[in-house]
Amino acid sequence: MTSLAEWLAQARQRLSHTADQPSLEAQVLLAHVLQKPRPWVIAHGDQTLEADQINLLETSLRALQAGFPLPYLTGRQEFFGLEFAVSPQVLIPRPETELLVEHALTWLRAHPARRRAADVGTGSGCITVTLAHHIPDLSLLAVDRFAAALNIARQNAQRWQVSERIHWLQSDLLSAVSDRLDLLCANLPYIPTHKLAGLRVAQHEPVLALDGGAEGLDLIHTLLTQAAGCLAPAALILLEIEAEQPESALTLARRCFPLAQSAVHTDLAGLPRLLSIQT
């Protein structure tokens, strides 16, 4: 018989070479299989595992060792204090994107009359749903090219009871949008194509959600070109960028919106992560 504590110790050792936080990943995986909260798993180390549980854990552990993302195994990922359903059809929400949400919330709270926003390339809906959750009178347009992504985003909106304020649109960026937006948010693919082959993230997450073209700015350029006809006066644009793109992103922003105030903001690690354009 194998106890929870024994399995956690073995899993932690096996994940030590591939996971950034092997103890945490082992606990999360065990909690998921047992359908128990993580604190319960930690507190009940003397409990024993059934044979079918051990088999399922072994299969999942091997997948983790091979680099398969833990959120895809559990079907869940936390973002900005909320839990989101995820699948291999969407990019896994990451802490870096919380910077965009923080800036959006600050701006929306400072401009209580500006309540028409859009999230282009919504994926799991983490930006859309989080903004709707925190700004109760906000009306949102969630755009994605893929129906599978929109379906997942809808599930997350329903879970957090914000669906009635979100309009879902399957579209290539803003090509089918005619609204006058106060706030435009987007976490579009921004990784240069030549970098993808060497990135672990590209092995399992959707490449179309990562590939930003030769310099990583192809879709951002298209979006900014389209945005000029979709913005209300004095609108704000917030775009996540790669850490090596601040100068080229600023140059692009100033070319598309020469009269706007454009800036790049750093994340908690001090890396350039967010492009803001106040038109």
Image (tube, rainbow, N blue to C red):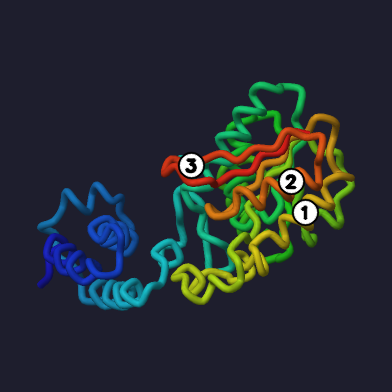
Give coordinates of residue 32: x percent, y percent.
Answer: 34, 60
- Residue type marked 1: Leu
Q: Residues within 10 Å of mark 1 (few under 14, many from 20)?
A: some
Nearer to us in this view, 258 or 241? 258
- Residue type marked 2: Ala
Determine whether the residue tagged by mark 2 lies in a helix, strand or loop.
Answer: helix
Disc 3 target residue:
267
Query: Left or right: where does residue 259 sit relative to residue 38?
Result: right
Q: Earlier in the sequence, mark 3 or mark 2?
A: 2
- Residue type marked 3: Asp
Determine whether the residue tagged by mark 3 lies in a helix, strand or loop.
Answer: loop
Q: Real-space Cα distance between discs 3 and 2?
A: 19 Å
Query: Left or right: where does residue 207 sit relative to residue 52?
Result: right
Would you place residue 200 above or below residue 152 in this image?
below
Give coordinates of residue 263: x percent, y percent.
Answer: 64, 37
Contact between marks 2 and 1 (CB within 8 A): the answer is: no
Name the residue at 52% across, 42% down.
98
The quadrant in which the N terminus is found is bottom left
Asked whether the viewer can see residue 139, the reply is no
Nearer to us in this view, 264 or 93? 264
Q: Real-space Cα distance between discs 2 and 1?
A: 11 Å
Residue 223: which disc?
1
Give coordinates of residue 117: x percent, y percent.
Answer: 74, 39
Name the residue at 51% across, 59% down.
92
Q: Earlier in the sequence, mark 2 or mark 1?
A: 1
Query: Left or right: where does residue 246 sit relative to residue 42?
Result: right
Determine whether the residue tagged by mark 1 lies in a helix, strand or loop.
Answer: helix
Would you place residue 262 above or below residue 197 in this image?
above
The quadrant in which the C terminus is found is top right
Q: Real-space Cα distance between discs 1 and 3?
A: 23 Å
Residue 253: which disc?
2
Name the residue at 80% across, 60% down.
171
